[in-house]
Image (spheres, rainbow, N blue to C red):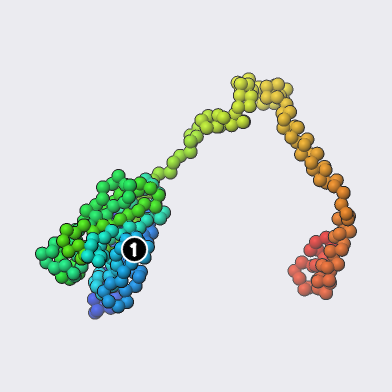
């Protein structure tokens, strides 16, 4: 069964409720791990009055957000325009959490907007990702009719060329460029790239590959064959091949000497006498406690 996407469809005023139906994911989309898209329904900034507000939070590019009333989307969403201040514009954002090499599928909805009329032609635009070998996708809205007419579930799949790839929607309409198409409800999903195996994956010899230059592998490497022939119980045979560990023994001796010097360092006061002085403070705080006042009797707390 293909992955599904939940759509909420109103059943009408008579029922006064909504039913969640499972609809197939767009054809050709195989990416299912969800990816966060910043401000995916363009709810920020909130357009409380009027048709438009400049700026798009979470995205770069000179554009504006259409109010829910102006967008007239079936879900009551705000939308962003690909035409602003008389020109076609681009909008970009990064998909955090996507690694280079991942397959990414975008889905969204588009609308020609009510500012264009029949005869102006569909609003055209492209969708792409910076550096990706996947060619940008070219899209067109429905024919304009001076009112909202949404395409639901447009789709574009690409391979990420970098971590946190940059995606860009660009208006390309040839006429009435300031009246660009509207887009909203952007959803992203991915198939992460396979994990890179370690350099020594599958190798049982620790001295193979990158490990060949380690001290453990270079020391007495020439005697490895002879060492393999020594019986495991023969200390004399192994000692004759691998040596007696003079350097290691010398290091242990130095550590023992340092520990002895620390232990025998002269002190101004005997540790037991110092503890007795501290006990006076402790006893002042716990002297009035009776055995039933605490779970553990104070006398067993520490030295005192």
Horizontal side, residue 19 vs residue 117: left or right: right
Residue at position x 33%, y 67% in the image: 55
Residue 2: horizontal and vertical position, in percent? 29, 54
Number of on-image labels: 1
Residue 98, image x, y percentages: 39, 52
Give the quadrant of the N terminus: bottom left
134 vs 269: above or below: above
Is residue 81 visible in the rendered image? The answer is yes
Q: Is residue 106 left or right of residue 240?
A: left
Quadrant housing residue 276 = bottom right
Q: Of 259 and 92, which appears nearest the observer?
A: 92
Q: Residue at x 85, y 47 (%)?
A: 265
Which type of secondary structure does the marked residue at label 1 adopt? Answer: loop
Seen in the picture, residue 23 relative to 292 is either above or below; the reply is above
Expressed as whole percent of the image width and height from the top left, the position of residue 304 reads 84, 63
Residue 250 vs residue 214: left or right?
A: right
Above-or-below relation of 216 to 68 = above
Residue drawn at x 21%, y 57% as measured from the top left: 172
Q: Residue furthest front?
A: 86
Give 36 or 128, whichever is nearer the viewer: 128
Q: Nearer the viewer, residue 26 or 146?
A: 146
Classify 10 Å Cα crowding around label 1: few (below 14), some (14-19), many (20 and above). Answer: some
Q: Quadrant of residue 97?
A: bottom left
Compared with residue 38, is residue 201 higher up or lower down, i.e. above or below? above
> At which x and y percent is residue 139?
21, 56
Q: Name the residue furthest left.
A: 119
Q: Would you name the residue on which mark 1 appears?
A: 40
Mark yes or no: residue 75 visible.
no
Image check: 207 left or right of 107? right
């Amino acid at each position: 069964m293909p992955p599904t996407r939940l759509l909420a469809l109103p059943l009408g005023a008579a029922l006064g409720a909504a039913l969640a139906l499972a609809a197939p994911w767009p054809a050709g989309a195989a990416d299912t791990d969800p990816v966060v898209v910043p401000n995916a329904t363009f709810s920020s900034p909130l357009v409380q009055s009027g048709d438009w507000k400049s700026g798009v939070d979470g995205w770069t590019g000179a554009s504006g957000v259409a109010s829910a009333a102006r967008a007239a989307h079936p879900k009551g969403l705000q939308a962003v325009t690909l035409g602003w201040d008389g020109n076609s514009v681009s909008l970009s954002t990064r998909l955090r959490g996507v690694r280079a090499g991942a397959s990414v599928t975008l889905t969204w909805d588009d609308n020609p907007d009510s500012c264009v009329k029949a005869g102006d032609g569909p609003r055209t635009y492209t969708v792409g990702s910076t550096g990706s070998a996947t060619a940008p996708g070219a899209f067109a809205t429905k024919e304009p009719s001076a009112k909202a007419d949404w395409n639901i579930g447009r789709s574009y799949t690409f391979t990420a060329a970098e971590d946190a790839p940059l995606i860009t929607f660009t208006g390309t309409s040839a006429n009435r460029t300031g009246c660009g198409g509207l887009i909203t409800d952007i959803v992203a999903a991915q198939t992460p790239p396979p994990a890179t195996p370690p350099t020594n994956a599958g190798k049982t010899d620790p001295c193979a590959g990158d490990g060949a230059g380690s001290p453990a592998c270079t020391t007495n490497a020439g005697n490895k064959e002879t060492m393999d022939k020594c019986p495991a119980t023969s200390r004399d045979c192994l000692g004759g091949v691998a040596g007696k560990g003079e350097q290691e023994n010398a290091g242990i001796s130095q550590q023992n000497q340092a520990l002895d010097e620390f232990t025998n360092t002269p002190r101004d006061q005997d540790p037991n006498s110092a503890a007795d002085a501290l006990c006076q403070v402790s006893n002042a705080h716990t002297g009035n406690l009776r055995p039933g006042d605490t779970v553990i009797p104070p006398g067993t707390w520490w030295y005192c």
